[in-house]
Image (spheres, rainbow, N blue to C red):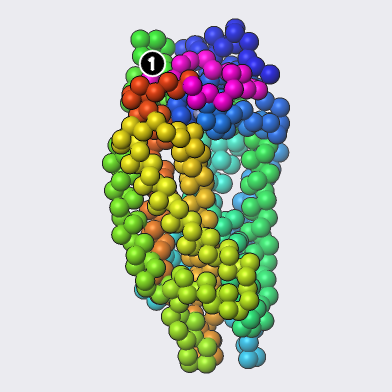
Amino acid sequence: MTAAPDTMMKADDAGEASLVSTAIVRECQDCGLFQTVAPLPSGDAAHCRRCNATLRRGARGGMNRALACYMAALLLLVLAVQLPFLDLSAVGRTYTATLFTGPAQLSDRGMWEVSIVVLITLVAVPFIQLLLILTVLLGLRGPNPPPALRYLFGWVETLRPWSMIEVFLLGVFVAYTRLTAIAEVKVGPALIALGGVMLCMIAADVELDHEDVWDLMETRGLTAHLPSQPQHPLIGCDCCKLVLHARERSRCPRCGSRLRRRKPQSLNRCWALLGAAIALYVPANIFPVMTVIRFGRGEPNTLFSGVIELIEAQMWPLALLVFLASITVPLLKLAALLIMLVMTGEGSVTRLRDRTRLYRFVDSIGRWSMIDVFMLTVLVAVVRMGFIAEVIPGLGAIAFASVVVLTMFAAASFDPRLMWDAAAAAGHDLEAEDLEPNPPHAQTLFKAGAP
Ligand SMILES: [Zn+2]
Ligand SMILES: [Zn+2]
């Protein structure tokens, strides 16, 4: 299914009269190619004809069902922060932990940096995200929706990568498997509630088409009016994905964020963040992440010796998971970003599509490295039996959490479109990279987006 020429023209004129159109224009965020995307059936996706990035996913368009899912998620999250999530029984005593016990223990032991990262990614961001989206969806149902709703909805996208409930659940699973070797562990209601939050959020994502929400805001008169400025080239909004003819650095009429052709100071920022991450990667691997004390004795564990210990305990799948998450992924991220920065700087034309795929991969897996930090938080929260068994966090944990956060920021600040710009500047024919002339759903409308 491809867009008809008349709908393409309508989409081209976005920005002037109406932002609502059957076929929408999208800029591929990974290679900078502008394409029209026809409406999609639920479960389908439109891909970039050049780099295969997902341009738009067909949602079921059930705004009411999405609203119900978000409400359920908020309710479950409120329960999750109040109820116990793990019970550990040993030598006649039971130790109960809530989601806040781990961060509190970490900060008591001087690790407030790790504690803050855990609280932000596990509680604060999911809460804010849910409150924002519920305010928007409920506000749009009212008779006079406030214009500020459009800014709030813009923030929902921005916060998304920092909500890490699913990573935490995997971290709990790793900790749980290790704990069953020490004592009797019981899963508390908060953990089930958190699982529910995750499922509700996934269900809501399947239902809600963000483009529908923006369309509704447009019909309710919440978006600003920006006259078409055909003298300026097309520009795509990084936040809400609207494409229009506008001046660089002007405000997006939909979400209000600044329009920029490319992420500002992308390469410099990425170099700085990557340099800091590489510097911290050394202490993250040298210093112990934690010390497990049993009957008064215990050896400090680094990231690597932690994996060895799991292998010795015959916990092979777990050892592999921790090895991938805490050693392979950070190293891969650092190496990949370094390669991309150097090759972009040199204006390389080789393997453009592969590099773009690598960027997408690196950007999406980075957060899973937090498994180790979450596992530590859980262990510190429940293993508090003094002489019999205790887990003491080590300095390596701060360095490791910093590496994860810094590489996430580094990947987010890198603009993969610059790789394509650099190749084009070096005289490379970008059209030669096209995967197929007419992929389903997406149709090239414009030549490569010139910076
Ligand atoms: Zn692309
Ligand atoms: Zn926007």
Residue 103, x across and y down, in percent: 47, 68
Residue 72, x across and y down, in percent: 67, 50
**Image point (50%, 53%), residue name:** 367
**Image point (39%, 30%), residue name:** 349
Residue type at mark 1 is Pro
Residue furthest out toward the top: 6
Q: Is residue 1 above or below residue 30?
A: above
Residue 203 in view = yes
- Which stretch did the figure color magenta? 432-451
In the visual, does 163 lie left or right of 209?
left
Q: Is residue 315 above or below residue 368?
A: below
Which quadrant of the figure has residue 399?
bottom left
Judged from the image, the secondary structure of the residue bearing numbered disc 1 is loop
User: Residue 287 or 353: which is nearer the viewer?
Assistant: 353
Quarter of the rendering occupied by the N terminus:
top right
Residue 422, x across and y down, in percent: 35, 29
Q: Is residue 139 above or below residue 215?
A: below
**Image point (52%, 74%), residue name:** 308
User: Residue 213 or 316: which is nearer the viewer?
Assistant: 316
Q: Which residue is mark 1?
A: 233
Which quadrant of the figure has residue 289?
bottom left
Q: Is residue 49 above or below residue 374?
A: above
Magenta residue check for 30: no
Quarter of the rendering occupied by the C terminus:
top left
In the visual, does 63 lie left or right of 381?
right
